[in-house]
Image (cartoon, grey):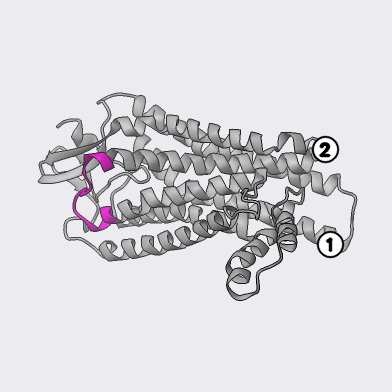
């Protein structure tokens, strides 16, 4: 029971109601204002999360459908870049699936209703798919760096085999790093304020530094290091384009400008999407996170930004590509409203759309 009293969880996707189980000297749990009477978040948060969930699911499903379409010969069209984009969409799709519906119920229901199995494995898979998504973004930045800066050696390094191997390593590392979540997430009941209710909380040994070390590890490998690598790779891409590329035609200048804007957007989106979540996590772990309406609103915003990242990724890495938009139109327009293309023309168009390119407009 003493250990349960210290389980105020602020990690992404974890079960958190509006009351802290850290007791004060009067043995009364500290709560956010309005926790006992309910609030507008009971309705607003599920609706807001539902919109994010719908947008993310539609966007990532479109990417999966377009990139998963088969060639006439029956073989899927793949390049190293498309393999990473496909993996990113799978990870974002899974992350939204394991996070948003369950987190929405936490704001609208008084207890965890999904049982011990889902308590453990939903949060484990949410952490794992979050890391897969972030690691894939890093891999894509490295892929773009190699394609632009080391164009001559690019075909050998950026092979489909190496891309598939990279995806396998990403999933393996993510599943391993997320193991402590499965170990320490547990269904608990019998709290003095709600003795008949069950809650899904993290369960770490009292006085152990393992929890703090794990939170720091996630901050480093899941945010700071990826942010550094993404920034460095794209900075080198921009430097190479502006110093090594001698073509100064108007088309080239427009391409450079568009690339710079895309790079800045990619870095800014990643930075802002995950910053509030990590601020709250570190603040709660190493400081005293205030429990009031402002902090509660900040927590909801951190969820929306983190989940929104999985909605924006398909736009940044797929729909901003002219080739992808052409392929999308072929799948959803030509097939429904136009006469089928000849096999020869269809093969040529798909080859143009999905071929590996050194153009940075496909980032």
Give the percent coordinates (x, y) of residue 289: 33, 44
Q: Is residue 338 visible?
A: yes
Give the percent coordinates (x, y) of residue 121: 32, 39
Q: Is residue 232 visible?
A: no
Is residue 220 shown above or below 47?
Answer: above
Viewed as shown, does residue 209 lie left or right of 161?
left
Residue sitting at x 43%, y 38%:
128
Q: Which residues are magenta?
A: 105-119
Quadrant of the frame with the N terminus: top left
* Nearest-to-viewer mark from 2 and 1: 2
Whichever of labels 2 and 1 marks the residue nearer the N terminus, that label is 2
Residue carrying label 2: 152
Residue carrying label 1: 251
Characterize the magenta stretch by its predominant secondary structure.
helix
Q: Does the segment drawn in magenta span residue 58?
A: no
Viewer-proximal residue among 101 and 270: 101
Viewed as shown, does residue 115 lie left or right of 288?
left
């Amino acid at each position: 029971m003493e250990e349960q009293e210290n389980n105020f969880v602020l990690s992404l996707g974890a079960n958190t109601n509006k009351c802290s189980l850290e007791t004060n000297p009067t043995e009364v749990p500290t709560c956010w204002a309005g926790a006992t009477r309910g609030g507008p978040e009971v309705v607003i948060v599920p609706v807001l999360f539902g919109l994010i969930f719908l947008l993310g699911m539609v966007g990532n499903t479109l990417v999966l459908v377009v990139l998963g379409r088969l060639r006439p010969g029956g073989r899927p069209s793949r390049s190293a870049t498309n393999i990473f984009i496909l993996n990113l969409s799978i990870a974002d799709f899974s992350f939204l699936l394991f996070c948003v519906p369950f987190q929405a119920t936490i704001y609208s229901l008084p207890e965890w209703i999904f049982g011990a199995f889902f308590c453990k494995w939903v949060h484990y898979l949410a952490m794992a798919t979050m890391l897969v998504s972030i690691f894939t973004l890093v891999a894509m930045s490295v892929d773009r760096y190699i394609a632009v800066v080391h164009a001559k050696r690019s075909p050998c390094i950026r092979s489909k085999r190496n891309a598939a191997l990279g995806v396998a390593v990403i999933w393996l590392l993510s599943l391993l790093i997320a193991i402590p979540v499965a170990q320490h997430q547990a269904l608990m009941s019998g709290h003095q304020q709600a003795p008949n209710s069950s809650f899904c909380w993290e369960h770490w040994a009292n006085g152990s530094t393992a929890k703090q070390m794990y939170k720091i590890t996630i901050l480093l490998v899941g945010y700071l290091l990826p942010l550094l690598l993404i920034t460095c790779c794209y900075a080198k891409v921009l430097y190479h384009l502006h110093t090594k590329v001698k073509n100064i035609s108007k088309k080239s200048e427009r391409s450079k400008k568009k690339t710079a804007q895309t790079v800045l957007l990619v870095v800014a989106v990643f930075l802002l999407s995950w910053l509030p979540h990590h601020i709250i996590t570190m603040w709660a772990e190493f400081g005293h996170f205030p429990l009031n309406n402002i902090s509660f609103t900040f927590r909801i915003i951190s969820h929306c930004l983190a989940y929104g990242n999985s909605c924006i990724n398909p736009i940044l890495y797929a729909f901003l590509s002219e080739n992808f938009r052409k392929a999308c139109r072929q799948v959803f327009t030509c097939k429904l409203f136009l006469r089928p293309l000849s096999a020869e023309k269809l093969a040529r168009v798909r080859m143009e759309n999905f071929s590996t390119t050194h153009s940075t407009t496909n980032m």
